[in-house]
Amino acid sequence: MNGTLLITVNVHGIGPEAASMPEAELFGRDAHGRYTYRIGLARVLDALRAYGLPATFFWPAMEAEKLPRLVDRCLRDGHEIASHGRAFEDHAQLAPDEEASLIGEAHEVLRRLSGVAPRGFRAPTGTLSQNTIPILQALGYRYDSSFLDDDSPYPLTAHGGDGMIELPISEALTDATHFRRRVTQDRAEELMREELSALLAVDGYACLTFHPRADIGVGRAARLPLIERLARLAEEQGARPALCGRFAEQIHIAGTANTIENAGD
């Protein structure tokens, strides 16, 4: 059985906390995100290089501006740069003109820093408005990866995204889901392995989501091997790792979001 594994990284530094309080006040427990800047993200990149795994990095514009050298490294290592909004705004609460402006601003920041216009988007807080997909479509985006409403990719035409594909995520395949609940590393891995095996067996598609933070992510040295072990488990089930943009384009060319076998080859 052939299948596709998407490995994605949400580049969260102090952005989630800075969205609701002044950055200068982020100390102690409120500054877990600084681990991303100091060592977490570089460590994730080192691990992906060592494991020979391609990944799609969803960058908030405010985080990208803080770490331009790591944006560049993502590209040099063969990874994909995608948009994760501007600065962790809740898109469901934005007026149409404001949302269009913020998405456009984030788009231009990533284009300027990477030299390539992003073609994928993931909502920074997991929420979108009815205007989000049409705004992205007008900017030339080919896929979104924010929804939890399906196990397999599907077209976004009904949501105003003609030519766009949704690459759904899974809470159970997201590191933060488990580490936020303070489960042990062994238990987190067990739960992710169960979900990964089940999804690949049924749909031949799975999307892993990691964070480089110290608290809810895999940035710590003891957690990093989880990435490789899950990727190897997927490989044993015949799934190959793919970049989100390339996979979405192949689905689009195939003409149907239901035909995903071999799309990741």
Image (spheres, helix red, strand yellow):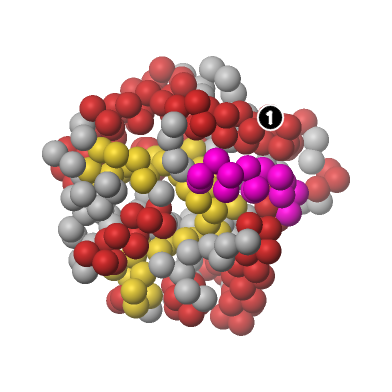
Residue 246: horizontal and vertical position, in percent?
38, 56
**Front-most of residues 34 and 215:** 34
Instruction: Label 1, secondary structure: give it.
Output: helix
In the image, residue 19 lies in the stretch drawn in magenta: no
Residue 103 relative to residue 178: left or right: right
What residue did someone put label 1 on? 39
Location of residue 212 with respect to 204 vertically, above or below? above
**Residue 229 horizontal/vertical position (percent):** 37, 23
Q: Is residue 72 magenta?
A: yes
User: Image point 22% across, 64% down: which residue?
Assistant: 254
Residue 112 falls in image quadrant: bottom right
Left or right of residue 15, residue 148 in this image: left
At x 46% / y 69%, what residue is drawn?
141
Q: Would residue 100 appear left or right of 172 to someone viewing this image?
A: right
Closest to the observer: 108 or 185?
A: 108
- Name of the residue lying farthest toward the right: 24
Which segment did they paint magenta?
Answer: 65-79
**Crowding at mark 1 (Cα within 10 Å: few <14, some 14-19, many 20+):** some
Relative height, residue 103 to residue 173 (above, below): below
- Residue type at tag 1: Ile
Q: Does any portion of residue 181 appear in the rendered image?
A: no
Which quarter of the rendered picture does the N terminus lie within?
A: top left
Residue 223: x %, y % from top left: 51, 22
Pinpoint residue 200: horizontal percent, then vertical percent: 22, 39
Instruction: Reply above or below: 32 against 3.
Output: above
